[in-house]
Image (cartoon, rainbow, N blue to C red):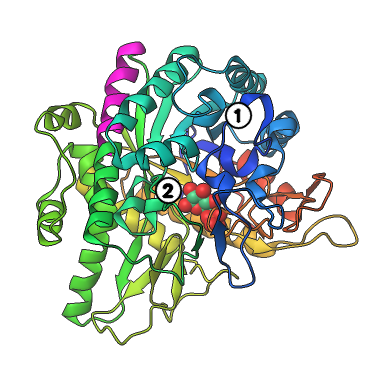
Amino acid sequence: MSELKLPENFIWGASICGAQCDGAWKEDGKGENILDHQTVCDSNKTRRFTHEINPDYYYPNHDGNDFYHRYKEDIGYMAELGFKSMRFSVMWTRLYPTGEEELPNPKGLQYYHNIINELKKYDMEPVIMLSHLDFPYHLAMKYGGWSDRRVIDLFLKFCKTVVTEFKGDVKKYIGFNEINILCQPIGSTLGGIIPDHDFDLNIVKIVPQESQEDMNKRFRALHNQFVAAAKLAIMAREIDPEIKIGGCVSGKCIYPLTPNPKDVLAAQQAMQIPDWFVGDMLVKGEYSYFAKRYLERNNIDNGALPEDAQILKKGTIDFYTINYYSSGCISSDDSVAKDCAMNMFISTKNPYLEASEWGWQIDADGLRYLCNEIYGRYGIPIMILENGIGAAEQLNENNTVSDPYRKEYIAKHIQAMKEVIDDGIELLGYYYWAPIDLVSASTGEMMKRYGFVFVDHYDDGSGTMKRYKKESFEWMKKVLHSNGEDLEY
Ligand code: BG6
């Protein structure tokens, strides 16, 4: 590994999501969200969305990893590792159980005060994500999710509560986790657009069949989220001018499968729609030429109003964040198999890369490539808000887990970040997903473990929730305490 260094003020953070780790789904007044209605996947990696909670199924997010009751212990582990920040989501349904109450739930507010106070004990900076898999079920049923403009104001009421309540304690907010997922049909559910019947979800195998109206709804939802994100930025800066607003994009790094110019064009287009469609909006506050063209070509009515333009222009972001796990390829030849799972995306395998057990290709150079693409387009600071590797693991006879692949994965991505900085890019920090095992977003599995800490909890709901340090724990501690210099594994 080279002698490149990370800056002294580089932010090392831990990333988690309330809907995936809290559990306590009905405790202290919390309302139901859309994830509360999703079962753990079956042997085909397919989750089921049920409107009624069916006692024959296991709904993993009801328990999460029990962070709600164990946040002190877990933040303690993060601090011991050497993380200087924690990015977490404040759940809408903990503060406004249906999304429509007049006043926030005091017990919900207290919980987040407790978390922030715990972080303060260790001098860790809280970074808050305001929407991450926690759309209130009630709003999904009543309004059709984000496709209805009235949801914007309801969300802003929640945001205002949070920003006002934690004024002085929290200086970085992000509106929506991976807002670009709505560019694909799979994103509809996350946008709270839920059919009135039960249905299956499999991000690799089930491509939702969309009617024109479904597509309109999905892009209306995306537009409404753009407006909400912009209004949030404007409002937060009015409440506290020191606040910085980030935008979070699921970093899709797509290469052409071959040097065939048609493949190169296909790759360019594949990055335009999920990545730059939203990137251009978040940073420049406008739909780019290809975004407008895409909407026109697909006859999409996204419900934009003339007065939105000014708001979108005013409420742009201060820093760009990506969740980056893997890369994929694309071919212009439709007969080439789409056999490569990426995070909420399907691509074609790259013969030069290895993959995780879940088929996500491991590509640290892709991180460098993507950061260069982003910085070249936008020139604003970047933060890696999620990066990590999920693996099927179990405790060995020494009550730990041997996870050398995690060390290798992280070391390579840290090395890539050093190169990113050496390329001249303003990279603010790196947040690892996720320091403590939690429930997978795509499959609902606990078996897909990302942590440095193993949680004794399994896909049938069994286990004690007790925590055990994996072998990577001490290694990561060494990495963080050396500011990423000691990467030997
Ligand atoms: C990110 C999401 O895209 O990927 C997280 O923001 C998610 O919520 C993470 O958990 C990893 O995906 P998965 O499906 O392995 O949990």
Task: State whether the magenta stretch is mostly helix, strand or loop.
Answer: helix
Q: Is label 2 within 8 A of ligand 1 (CB to nearest ligand atom)? A: no
At x 42%, y 26%, the residue is 172
Residue identified by numbered label 2:
190
Image height of 121 relative to 81, above or below: above
Query: Is-magenta flag for residue 231?
Result: yes
Amino acid tagged 2: Leu
Residue 102 visible in the shown view: yes
- Left or right relative to 292: residue 103: right
Image height of 163 relative to 452, above or below: above
At x 61%, y 42%, the residue is 480
Span of residues in magenta: 226-239
Quarter of the image where the C terminus is located: bottom right
- Left or right relative to 6: residue 209: left
Badge count: 2
Quote the CA–CA distance across marks 2 and 1.
Answer: 19 Å
Residue identified by numbered label 1:
30
Q: Secondary structure at mark 1?
A: loop
Horizontal and vertical percent position of residue 93: 53, 30
Query: Which comes before the other along the chain, label 2 or label 1?
Result: 1
Frontmost residue, 449 versus 373: 449
Residue 380 visible in the shown view: no
Horizontal and vertical percent position of residue 240: 36, 13
